[in-house]
Amino acid sequence: MKIGIIGTGAVGKTIASKLLELNHGVMMGTRNVSDKITSTAKDIYGNPPFNEWLKTNNKIKLGSFAEAAAFGDLIINATNGRNSVTALINAGAKNLAGKILVDIANPLDFSSGMPPTLLAGLNNTNSLGEEIQKTFPDTMVVKTLNTMWCGLMINPNLVEKGDHINFISGNNPEAKTKVKKLLNQFGWLDENIFDIGDITGARATESLLPIWLKVMGVTKNGAFNFKLVR
Ligand SMILES: NC(=O)c1ccc[n+]([C@@H]2O[C@H](COP(=O)([O-])OP(=O)(O)OC[C@H]3O[C@@H](n4cnc5c(N)ncnc54)[C@H](OP(=O)(O)O)[C@@H]3O)[C@@H](O)[C@H]2O)c1
């Protein structure tokens, strides 16, 4: 499948590498392609600059947000949550129309330092996932994978033999079925992909971030997840 990833951060890179390994065609989208390619800045975690990463993943194409969205039969939103709607507007409603958009972003507000809070207007009675769905009514938004560190998204077996939870929500059942198949390719077992219904489920999963961030603050290691026991 051809997949467009809107975003070049840790999530975008992690998912892109995995999709390449799975033989999907991948184009990543960024605000300014030449800036991204020429930048020698390390990322916020101290990893090598994006262009060095791209050299070792040279089958991955890099384009504008709009080019990546036009390229993909399925789109992944891996942008900073504060700017996701703007980034997707730049990707272009027409390039997203009729397609599944997997939304991994979280509406985090870092303006008062760490830990971040949930952005005003995008919590409790609303969410980023819903806001994206409202902005792009012709796109099938599926919220998933946003409740864990990106290393686990594509390698759930890293902890507890993969036996932990990944929520999924969205208004279109067929879209969720297709995304579940992609999650299976990442290593997620059907019994650990928990469907919580329509896109209002994004309110719940985005609201897991405060506790996720607290646990991360104590453990200093993102390789953990939640598990449902019944
Ligand atoms: N890191 C994780 O393990 C993790 C886990 C779960 C969920 N998430 C969520 O996944 C999303 C991506 O996280 P991340 O850590 O990979 O990277 P990030 O730093 O949160 O986002 C990087 C992306 O956001 C874009 N961006 C930043 N400011 C922008 C603006 N003003 N306008 C348009 N686009 C802008 C960047 O564009 P350029 O390409 O132009 O630089 C880049 O592609 C976030 O919403 C995060 O909360 C992250």
Image (spheres, grey):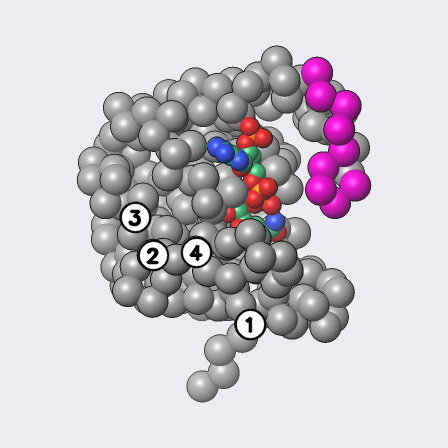
Please, what is the three-letter code of the amino acid marked with disc 3?
Answer: Glu
- Residue 35 point in image, percent of width and height: 63, 18
Q: Nearer the viewer, residue 89 or 166?
A: 89
Quadrant of the drawing holding the C terminus:
bottom left
Provide the residue designation for mark 1: 211
Look at the numbered discs 4 and 2 and tell me whether their residues touch, using CB distance below 8 Å: yes
Horizontal side of residue 62 vs 92, given as left or right: right
Q: Between disc 1 and disc 2, whose residue precedes?
A: 2
Instruction: State the count of labels.
Output: 4
Identify the element where label 2 is drawn: loop
Image quadrant holding the N terminus, namely top left
Q: Nearer the viewer, residue 173 or 42?
A: 42
Q: Which residue is mark 4?
A: 119
Q: Which mark is first along the chain, 4 or 1?
A: 4
In magenta, the rendered stretch is 38-46
- Marks 3, 4: nearer the viewer: 4
- CA distance for labels 3 and 1: 23 Å
Q: Which x, y percent locates residue 61?
A: 56, 19
User: Residue drawn 30% across and 34% down?
Assistant: 99
State the residue at coordinates (31%, 44%).
132
Q: Is residue 113 left or right of residue 137?
A: right
x 37%, y 39%: residue:
85
Q: Which residue is mark 2?
A: 121
Q: Give the Cα distance between marks 2 and 3.
A: 10 Å
Mark 1 touches mark 2? (CB < 8 Å): no
Cα distance between the residues tagged 1 and 4: 15 Å
**Element type at marker 4?**
loop
N-term-proximal mark, 3 vs 4: 4
Image position of 148 with respect to 96: above or below:
below
